[in-house]
Image (cartoon, grey):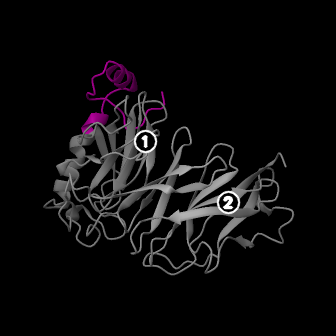
Amino acid sequence: GKMSTPLLVGTYGEKLGHVDGKGKGVYAVRFDRETLSLVPFTPMPGLTTPQLGGASGLVNPTWLTSCGDGKVLYICDERGDGPGNLAAVSVDAATGALALLNSIPADDRAGGAACCHASVTPGGAHVVASNYCAGSVVAVARRADGSLDAPSAQYVHLPPASHPVSFPGPNAARQEASHAHMAYCSAGTHGTTILVPDLGCDVVWSIPYDAESAKPLGEPVATASPPELRGGGPRHLVRHPTEPLVYVGYELTSVLAAYPIDKRTGAIAGDEPLCALNVLDGDAGGFMGGSGEDADLSSVEAYQTTVRKYARLLQGSAAAATAAWHGGEHRGGVPLCSDK
């Protein structure tokens, strides 16, 4: 009804190194905005009815994204024992019923890929996805019905030959190989760039995207990798809604850093952050095995000094920051987040 919103919930269905999954597939429910509760779609017997799961289905449908009207979903089947799949699924908005259109291998190699994130490119020509364990990105064209055009799939392995990376990184336990965790479409005025935070390589790859090319993904360029934040392990990012800024989360050191975006291409403009903050408010510890000392810094105090170097750029008024930014000068006073 008008007072409810469809919700599609992905799950882990098996025990992996970081999770003991108990899910059985994808669950379709509605969120009732009047009662603030989850309710079933009418034809369904209850809230616990899974779809698309089972040994022959999607074992770990952990990431779901849609395009436009929401009639088609793209789902990452995050597998640790093989390449897994990137699947196209139709959605019946009236009943919540899901139907598999088709799928492609998430990676073009046999090992565990752990496909973990997917996006639909601006204009809807392609779906791009990242593979955490395989350290790769795939782009595949969308057909008119929303299904995936398997022969068009392009796989890009990281790091590229043009930018070799020595492993392990400063955090030897977590940075033993490339770990691409996201494929984010960053649109500019004259093009789009796929931004890929790579925890293992300690960079955010800026990959040029060309919707008209048979090989839509260009050569990855290493960005957002300042020496002072080495060992941080970039994991997630998001663009500012109005300003040419991107915020990058470094999982292993719990740092959030802001970088300028090239307005024309959507790529990250270089390595130097405009500012950085420790989101744990002075605690140099990290998440899942990360710490300030892993960041190739001699002590927690040295780590905090590094963060304070960038945090100084936060000082100043929002008005001065806005004037400096629109004047084309990325100077002191640029805020980490602007809600002007």
Q: Position of residue 110 (x, y in %)?
A: 40, 75
Q: Which residues are the magenta region?
A: 312-340
Res 45 → quadrant: bottom right
Q: Is residue 318 magenta?
A: yes
Q: CA distance from mark 1 to mark 2?
A: 33 Å
Vertical placement of residue 55 versus 255, above or below: below
Mark 2 neighbour class, 10 Å CA radius: few under 14, some 14 to 19, many 20 or more = some
Q: Is residue 236 magenta?
A: no
Of all residues, the one furthest to the left in this rendering is 298
Q: Position of residue 60 (x, y in %)?
A: 55, 72
Res 107 → quadrant: bottom left
Residue annotated with mark 1 = 213
Mark 1, mark 2: which one is toward the viewer?
1
Residue 208 visible in the shown view: yes
Horizontal relation, residue 269 to residue 185: left or right: left
Residue 180 visible in the shown view: no
> Mark number for residue 320?
none
Q: Tag 2's secondary structure?
A: strand
Q: Tag 1's secondary structure?
A: loop
Q: Position of residue 309 (x, y in %)?
A: 21, 42
Circles 1 and 2: CB distance less than 8 Å? no
Disc 2 residue type?
A: Leu
Residue annotated with mark 2 = 8
Q: Identify the residue shown where x is 86% and y is 65%.
A: 43
Q: Which of the two residues, 337 or 116, is positioned nearer the viewer here?
A: 116
Disc 1 residue type?
A: Ser
